[in-house]
Amino acid sequence: MVVGIGIITFRLHDCHSLKGKRKIIKAIIIRLQNKFNASVAEIGFNDIYQRSLIGFSMVGNNRKVVNSKIDKIFNMADELGLAEIIDTEMEIININSS
């Protein structure tokens, strides 16, 4: 089993309230979940309206496929143009089952 984990840090330039931030981040999360069938959630900077931290995870049986999907998630999040990506992180973990 292969587990892929990713974190995206966003800067929201034209956002001046938490309500506006929630609208943008919710749109990003929903699009990523629907396109890639990944678990996606806001995991940080909850009270800062011009920053957001989104985490996601997925499970598969092929390391290359999981790595490719993580890269595609990063690319799609950038292509949406709803917020500027200022940092990304990823980790892929192999778990051997008996």
Image (cartoon, grey):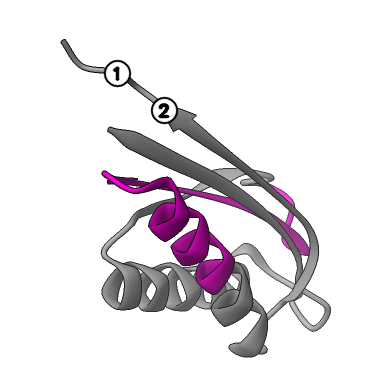
For marks 1 and 2, give the CA distance. 6 Å
Q: Secondary structure at mark 1?
A: loop
| Mark 1 vs 2: CB contact within 8 A | yes
* Magenta highlight on residue 68: yes
What residue span does the magenta drawing correspond to?
A: 47-73
Q: Position of residue 4 (x, y in %)?
A: 45, 43
**Residue 24 rendering spot, x and y as whole percentages:** 55, 77
> Mark 1 belongs to which amino acid?
Asn
Image side of residue 74 versus residue 48, left or right: left
Q: Residue at 34%, 22% (x, y): give it.
A: 95
Q: Is residue 85 above or below residue 65?
A: below
Disc number for residue 94: 2
* Kind of residue sitting beneath label 2: Asn
**51 horizontally vs 68: left or right:** right
Residue 12 in the image, given as x and y percentages of width and height = 76, 73
Of all residues, the one furthest to the top in this rendering is 98
Q: SS at mark 2?
A: strand
Percent across and percent down for residue 7 are: 61, 48
Asked which quadrant contains residue 29, the reply is: bottom left
Crowdedness near tag 2: few (<14), some (14–19) or many (≥20) residues, C-alpha within 10 Å = some
- Residue 96's disc is 1
**Residue at (43% x, 51% y) in the render:** 41
Position of 86 with respect to 66 (left or right) is right
